[in-house]
Image (cartoon, grey):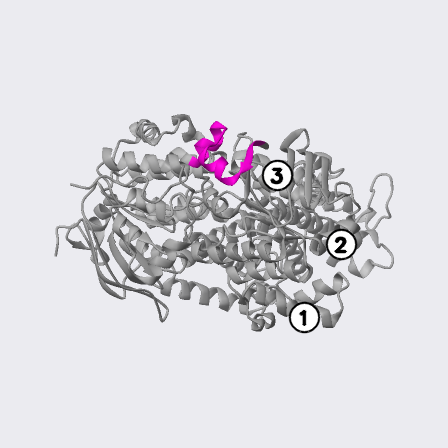
């Protein structure tokens, strides 16, 4: 679905991300892992075509099927974003217009991309059912829903648009762990049922370990390792990945000595 | 009544007409010992911490430290208590004054309790910074010139300055990268043994609690739903909420 | 904070180069890149210089005082008197230049008084809270219930007309705003981690106020102060215009406008020159204050 080749993102002369190759197939969930400063978010921004707006220069190639996305005019990018490529951001409510009820927001988004009213209604109902949200939610404003609901609504938008690719940047790091599980399960179902290609950007290796088919590990703007999730996590080839895996606290791994 | 260092019984804290903490009880023996407070947002963890520190007045119940009722402390007794119990909060909550040099922040307790002479304060600050693994030269920096991990170490040094017996660690690593978190956890483990510290660790991360705490309580909506020693609690959770929490935590595949 | 993530997701604090006292330095950098603020700062600096150097640059320094030259009263602008002369023959340009001194002195005095009274009251009210907060805030409410100009007028009318009494009258209506502002900051700062930590350390309330609350509450006060310079000068000019402030022979713009207003048809430069000076002064400090507000926003400073 998505093929990234020799992608480089610069701020001035500082290269903040360099991704030689990254592929994302239909129905696949690829995890992009890294700590702060690793360039993982910048990479997803560049794929979405949002990096130049942040003042970055981008070179290389990002293809959606056969179509080159880099250097595409803003108008065409806007059309692709939302229609074929959807995104879910970290701040659950921040990415939703606060003055609009969710129903209106859904309606507007679908109308912008030329979907007929009757069709839009059907799609909305189906999408909400898909992410297990009640239609009653459509009457609420973003501040009246929980963080988990907001994230699932963002996913529902992608479902309604029939987006083929979904980029999720730390979609659950602001959420409680039980809510996180709901959102991630929703994402996971999406790719199984609709064949959506998902790029999940996260600092949490355990989260990626549970959901991703393949992992790309970044550090200081460079890809240090990529491969099938299990291989990367159980037999890392780079020292950094090994350090990263070792740093993840695991229940039962180390416990305080019994106190006197 | 036990010989616990900290004894909390039937603690209820009310904001307005809402009980944010209801009938919470636990004991913390003298260190080295860790008690974990597990719960999600809104569970009342931070409010319990503030009650332990004597920063909020309970609506009901008792908080007893070293045999004395914390809410009733006044004057010199309160001042003495302030040396015994310290807080380490989450980085990102502006735990350090952005307008104060790190050294001045770390030395604040030394000044408040006249622990060392003013002239010897810089030396003591340097020693404290070294103890938590920081370059003493960082004393001249401002917080924004430090990394998140360094700031958190400085916050720990500030707490240690007054030689406390009990630390309240409120999500001490949740704003940090995982490799940085690992080093902070190591630091807490080391200090616990070297200084024979007791601590109350507030965290939403079960694995962090598991690593640092012998005993844990699980909170939901301001109430204790389950408590026990941490390994048992996490390996065989009894309450449905604890089970749900436990199941929601993703884990790395075993090597 | 803007919705945009920082480049490469680096924690901002780490990315910031460790230079000088970071915040001050980057605030200056930010100020330089804000054109309006820069113009305001340059104008304000120029006005301060004029005030300081008035005896040197004014062509007839004595005309700022009690000197009179009835023989050349109401002269038209000429090479010698660029802005003509006033009703008793004093050089208008010299008086306008000296007027900068009077205005800045009034503004500075009012601000110092307002800040010294308002800020401590506001900080204590906000930090301590409870009944003390209620009492202090009800008092400020009483002051704020009257329109500022009206209250200043009433007070100035009771006192004998002079620059000093005008200053007091204005300060009396200005401090409640600073109390309000400082209270808002203190309420926000009260719950910050470092204040909580200081309380847990047993640091005294007075010390917390002085070392933690006050330093972190200065930015909005600074911004408000520079924004207020214009308003204070206009109020002072209004009092003088109405005869309740500066008295002849003091070189004060409002007084000069009042003395020249009847002559607008024949000697328009006489009332207009001090009027223009008032506008320039107000504008300069407004631009500066607005710019400061933008660049001193700590979140914006950190992001640079």
Q: CA distance from mark 1 to mark 3?
A: 40 Å
Picture coordinates of residue C234 (x, y %)? 67, 56
Is residue C157 at least partly visible in the picture?
A: no
- B3 left or right of C89 in image: left
The picture quadrant where one finds residue B163 is: top left
Query: Residue at point 20% right, 48% down?
Result: B76
Figure check: B18 above or below B178: below
Please state which of the two labelled residues, at mark 1 or mark 3, is closer to the viewer.
1
Give the structural element (helix, strand or loop) at label 2: helix
Circles 1 and 3 on the same subunit: no
Number of numbered discs on residues: 3
Is residue C46 at least partly visible in the picture?
A: yes
Q: Which residue is mark 1?
A: A122
Magenta span covers which residues? A223-245
Circles 2 and 3 on the same subunit: no
**Foreground residue among C106 and C33:** C33
Q: Which residue is mark 2?
A: A79
Q: Which residue is mark 3?
A: C7
Circles 2 and 1 on the same subunit: yes
Figure check: B131 above or below A173: above
Task: Assess disc 2: are there few (<14), some (14-19) or many (≥20) residues with their C-alpha within 10 Å of its C-alpha.
Answer: few
Task: Assess disc 1: are there few (<14), some (14-19) or many (≥20) residues with their C-alpha within 10 Å of its C-alpha.
Answer: few
Magenta span includes A258 = no
Figure check: A231 above or below C64: above
Magenta span includes A237 = yes
Query: Disc 2 is attached to a residue of which chain?
Result: A
């Amino acid at each position: 679905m998505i093929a990234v080749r020799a992608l480089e993102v610069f701020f001035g002369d500082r290269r903040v991300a360099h991704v030689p190759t990254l592929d994302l197939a239909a129905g696949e969930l690829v995890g992009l892992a890294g700590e702060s400063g690793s360039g993982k978010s910048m990479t997803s921004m560049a794929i979405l075509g949002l990096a130049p707006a942040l003042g970055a220069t981008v070179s290389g190639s990002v293809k959606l099927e056969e179509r080159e996305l880099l250097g595409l005019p803003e108008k065409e990018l806007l059309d692709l974003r939302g229609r074929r490529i959807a995104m879910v951001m970290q701040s659950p409510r921040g990415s939703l217009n606060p003055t609009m009820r969710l129903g209106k927001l859904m309606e507007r988004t679908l109308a912008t991309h030329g979907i007929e009213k009757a069709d839009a209604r059907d799609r909305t109902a189906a999408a909400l059912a898909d992410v297990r949200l009640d239609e009653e939610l459509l009457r609420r404003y973003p501040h009246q829903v929980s963080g988990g609901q907001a994230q699932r609504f963002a996913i529902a938008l992608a479902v309604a648009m029939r987006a083929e690719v979904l980029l999720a940047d730390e979609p659950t790091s602001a959420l409680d762990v039980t809510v996180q599980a709901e959102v991630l399960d929703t994402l996971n179902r999406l790719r199984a049922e609709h064949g959506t290609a998902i790029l999940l950007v996260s600092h949490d290796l355990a989260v990626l370990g549970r959901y991703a088919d393949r992992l790309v590990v970044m550090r200081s703007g460079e890809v240090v390792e990529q491969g099938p999730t299990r291989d990367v996590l159980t037999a890392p080839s780079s020292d950094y990945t090994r350090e990263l895996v070792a740093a993840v606290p695991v229940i039962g791994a180390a416990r305080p000595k019994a106190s006197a | 009544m036990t010989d616990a260092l900290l004894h909390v019984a039937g603690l209820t804290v009310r904001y307005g007409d809402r009980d944010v903490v209801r009938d919470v009880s636990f004991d913390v023996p003298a260190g080295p010992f860790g008690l974990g407070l597990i719960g999600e947002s809104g569970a009342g963890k931070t409010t319990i911490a503030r009650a332990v520190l004597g920063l909020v007045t309970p609506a009901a119940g008792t908080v007893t430290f070293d045999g004395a009722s914390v809410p009733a402390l006044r004057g010199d007794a309160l001042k003495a208590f302030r040396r015994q119990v310290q807080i380490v909060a989450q980085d990102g909550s502006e735990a350090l004054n952005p307008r104060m040099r790190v050294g001045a922040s770390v030395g604040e307790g030394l000044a408040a309790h006249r622990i060392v002479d003013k002239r010897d304060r810089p030396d003591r600050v340097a020693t404290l910074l070294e103890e938590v693994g920081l370059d003493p030269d960082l004393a001249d920096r401002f917080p924004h010139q430090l990394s998140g991990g360094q700031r958190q170490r400085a916050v720990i040094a500030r707490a240690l300055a007054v030689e406390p017996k009990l630390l309240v660690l409120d999500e001490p690593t949740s704003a940090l990268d995982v490799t940085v978190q690992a080093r902070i956890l190591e630091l807490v483990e080391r200090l616990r043994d070297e200084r024979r510290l007791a601590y109350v660790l507030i965290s939403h991360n079960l694995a962090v609690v598991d690593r640092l705490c012998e005993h844990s309580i699980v909170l939901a909506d301001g109430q204790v739903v389950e408590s026990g020693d941490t390994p048992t609690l996490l390996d065989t959770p009894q309450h449905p909420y604890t089970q749900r929490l436990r199941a929601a935590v993703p884990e790395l595949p075993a090597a | 904070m803007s919705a945009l993530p920082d480049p490469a997701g680096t924690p901002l604090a780490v990315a910031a180069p460790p230079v000088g006292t970071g915040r001050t330095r980057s605030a200056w950098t930010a100020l330089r890149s804000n054109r309006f603020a820069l113009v305001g700062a340059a104008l304000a600096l120029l006005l301060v210089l004029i005030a300081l150097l008035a005896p040197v640059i004014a062509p007839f320094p004595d005309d700022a005082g009690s000197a009179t030259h009835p023989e050349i009263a109401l002269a038209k602008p000429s090479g010698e008197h660029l802005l003509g002369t006033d009703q008793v023959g004093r050089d208008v340009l010299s008086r306008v230049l000296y007027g900068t001194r009077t205005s800045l002195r009034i503004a500075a005095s009012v601000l110092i008084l307002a800040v010294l009274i308002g800020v401590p009251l506001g900080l204590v009210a906000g930090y301590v809270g409870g009944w003390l907060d209620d009492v202090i805030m009800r008092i400020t409410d009483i002051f704020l219930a009257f329109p500022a100009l009206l209250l200043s007028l009433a007070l100035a009318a009771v006192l004998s007309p002079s620059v000093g009494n005008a200053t007091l009258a204005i300060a009396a209506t200005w401090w409640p705003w600073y109390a309000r502002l400082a209270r808002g900051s203190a309420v926000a700062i009260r719950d910050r981690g470092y204040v909580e930590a200081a309380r847990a350390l047993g640091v005294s309330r007075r010390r917390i106020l002085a070392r933690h609350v006050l330093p972190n509450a200065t930015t909005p006060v600074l911004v408000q102060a520079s924004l207020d310079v214009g308003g204070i000068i206009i109020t002072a000019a209004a009092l003088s215009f109405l005869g309740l402030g500066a008295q002849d022979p003091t070189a004060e713009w409002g007084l000069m406008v009042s003395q020249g207003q009847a002559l607008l048809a024949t000697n328009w430069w006489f009332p207009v020159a001090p009027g223009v000076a008032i506008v320039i002064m107000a504008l300069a400090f407004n631009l500066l204050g607005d710019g400061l507000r933008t660049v001193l926003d700590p979140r914006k400073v950190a992001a640079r």
